Amino acid sequence: MKFIYTFLLLIVLCVNAVAQDVHLTQYYTSNLSLNPAYTGNFEGDIKVGLNSRTQWAQVSPAMKTNMVSIEKKFLKRPNEFGLGAIIINDQVSSYFLHTNKILLSGSYQKNYKGHLIRFGLQSGIVMRNINTNDQTFPSQWDYQLGGYDPSANNNEGTLKNSWSYLNVNAGVAWTHLFGKVKLTGGYALFNLNKPVEGYGSATKAVPFRHVLNASAVYYMTPTIHLLPHLLYMNSATATDFLFGVNATKKVTDNLGFLVGAGYRGSTQNSDAAIAVAGINYNRFAFGFSWDFNVSSLSKDARNKSAWELSLTYITPSRASNKVTLPCDRY
C-alpha cells in the first residue's frame, strides 16, 4: 500500500502542473535534454550517452532525432557539482527543416538533512535551416492548367533559409529516500531568454517550454526494482504527457535486464502505446523502445510507429567511501 500511495502522489504532482519540441520516449536516459538540474545526477564519475529516435518511418522521409552527451560529477561532500555538454540534431524531413543545438550545462546539489536539492543552468546556440527550394507554395499552382508547376516562382525570395539564436534554460529538482522508495521530482523552464526566430520579417519569440517530471524507485528486493515515471510538457498550446512503469532485474553483479510499458498523449488526443526493453552489462546500459500510434486525430497518423535506441556508459566513481584518520607514527 505504501508503494501505491507513493505512486498516486506522483500522479497528483504532474497532473496539477502546466511540448512540443525535441522529445524522447526514454527521456530519463538523457539528463541534459530533460532538465539542466540533473547534470551529473548519476552514480559514477563520467557519463556518456547516445540517443536516437526515428518517428513514423512508414511515412518517407521519417522524422529523426539524435543526441550525444557527456557529464562529469565533482564531489564535495555532502554536496556536489555537475558539468555537461549535449549536441542535438533534429530533422523534420517532410518540411526540410533541420535543427542543431549545442548546449553546456552546470548544476549544484545541496544535501539538506537527506533531501537532495539540485539547481541547474544551461545555455548554448540553436541553429536552424530550411530548404524552401524543395517545398511547394500557392504561387506555383497553375490555375489555367489545373496543376502544380515546379518551375514557377514561389515568390518567397525574402525568406531566410537559416538562422541561429542563443538559448538559455534552467531547472530545479529534488530527491529523497523514504524507506524502500526513492522519490524524485523536477521542473525545468526552457527558452528562458525568449529568443526570436522565423523567416524574414515573419519572426516571433520562441515560447517557454515547461517540463515537469516525477519518478520513483521502489526497492522490492535487493535485485528487483520498480520504476514508475511521469513527464508533462507544455509549450504555448502544445502539450505532451507520458506515463510509464519499468521494472529491473539484477541477475549478476555485471548483468541486469529492464522491461516496461507506457502511454503518451496530450490534453486533446491520445498518441501512442509504449513498450520498453533494456539490458545492463558492466558499465553499459542499452535501451530500446517502440511507440505504436493509437491517435484518432488523423487516419494518416493511425498505426504509425516510432522506435528509439539509447546507450549510456558510466565510469566508476573515483571518490573514496573510506574515512582515513591520521595518527602519529612512533
Image (tube, rainbow, N blue to C red):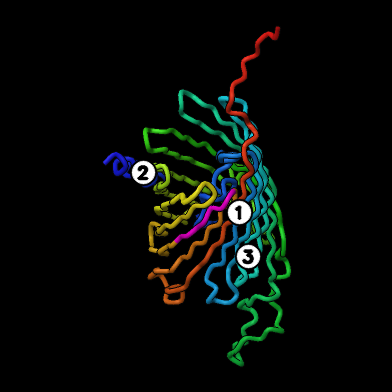
Mark 1: which amino acid? Answer: Lys
Residue 26 sits above or below residue 4 on the image: below
Q: Secondary structure at mark 1?
A: strand
Look at 54% across and 33% down and name the residue there.
Answer: 118
Is residue 27 or residue 317 the one in the foreground?
A: 317
Residue that mark 3 sits on = 91
Q: Secondary structure at mark 3?
A: strand
Residue 220: quadrant of the picture? top left
Q: Secondary structure at mark 2?
A: loop
**Which portion, as a residue range, is magenta?**
276-282
Rendering coords of residue 12 (x, y %) = 34, 43
Q: How many other residues sit within 10 Å of disc 3, few (<14), some (14-19) or many (≥20)? A: many
Q: Of the residues tagged 1 and 3, which is closer to the observer?
A: 3
Is residue 4 or residue 38 the one in the foreground?
A: 4
Q: Of the residues tagged 2 and 3, which is closer to the observer?
A: 2
Q: Is residue 80 left or right of residue 328?
A: left
Using the image, tell me which numbered label, if any, was put on residue 220. 2
Quarter that holds the C terminus: top right
Residue 114 lies in the magenta-colored region:
no
Q: Earlier in the sequence, mark 1 or mark 2?
A: 1
Rendering coords of residue 22 (x, y %) = 56, 57
Residue 137 sits above or below residue 97 on the image: below
Residue 271 sits above or below residue 210 on the image: below
Rendering coords of residue 294 (x, y %) = 39, 69
Residue 79: quadrant of the picture? top right
Q: Earlier in the sequence, mark 2 or mark 3?
A: 3
Task: Check the image and name the residue furthest to the left.
Answer: 1
Mark 2: which amino acid? Answer: Met
Look at 63% across and 60% down and name the residue there.
Answer: 66
Rendering coords of residue 37 (x, y %) = 56, 38
Residue 170 shows up from this direction: no
Give the tally of numbered discs: 3
